Amino acid sequence: MTHFVEVDVRPVLRDGGEPFEQIMGAVAGLAPGDGLRLLATFKPTPLLHVLASRGFSHEAKELAGGDWEVLFTPSDVDWAPEPAGAAAAQDGAWPEPARFLDNRDLDPPEPMVRIMATTAEMAKGEVLAALLCREPLFLFPELAKRGHSWRGAFEPDGTTYKVLVKIGGAAEAA
């Protein structure tokens, strides 16, 4: 039987906060075989995909008053964290970044807009470095569609997410 660690993010959400880092911190702290019981004010659809990619299945149900309970259960598949972007691991050594963006003080979707605009101006093989205040989950599929590779992780401070984007074939069409 799976032991579930409970994370109730409803107060954070009701106060207008962003609980993603709190949730991912709880996931990182799970013991092998543990699951996560998440309580939220809405069905966290993007999170379902994020945790599925990390080896969790889910069961979501709406509670009284419109709140949601989601049970994330670990699958039998071993998951080891790796840099975002499947192509990144096979891309070899990357050059030093040619451009740098600090998007930590911007509200969504501005960081993504700035990153996409900058990548459109860059040459194939160049690297963009960007700092963000959260993991840019919606950015990754857009980069992949344009043929770019990326690597990303939280910096040691735990609050800054650094992403490196290596420009692919889409940039040379301009």
Image (cartoon, helix red, strand yellow):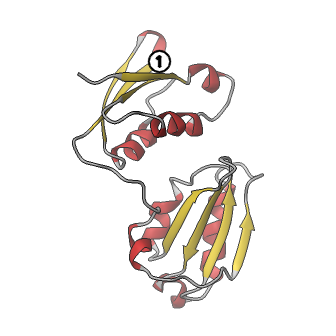
Please determine whether, in this image, residue 128 is positioned above or below residue 141.
Answer: below
Task: Indicate the quadrant where residue 145 lies.
Answer: bottom left
**SS class of the residue under badge 1?**
loop
Circle count: 1
Pick whichever, 129 or 112, lies toward us: 129
Q: Residue at x 43, y 21 (%)?
A: 68
Q: Is residue 110 left or right of residue 143?
A: right
The location of residue 106, given as percent across then percent down, is 74, 52
Q: Residue at x 60, y 79 (%)?
A: 127
Please determine whether, in this image, residue 142 is positioned above or below residue 123.
Answer: above
Point out the image quarter for the N terminus: top left
Task: Indicate the quadrant where residue 171 lies.
Answer: bottom right
In the displayed image of the protein, which residue is found farthest to the top?
64
Q: Residue at x 42, y 33 (%)?
A: 30
Please determine whether, in this image, residue 143 is positioned above or below residue 21.
Answer: below
Pick whichever, 115 or 100, lies toward us: 100
The location of residue 94, given as percent across then percent down, is 54, 82
Q: Residue at x 45, y 82 (%)?
A: 92
The location of residue 114, given as percent across then percent down, is 68, 65
Q: Is residue 2 left or right of residue 16?
A: left
In the displayed image of the protein, which residue is found farthest to the right?
105
- Dot 1 amino acid type: Asp
Which residue is disc 1 drawn over?
67
Tell me the crowding category of disc 1: few under 14, some 14 to 19, or many 20 or more residues within 10 angstroms, Cα based: some
Task: Indicate the quadrant where residue 120 lies.
Answer: bottom right
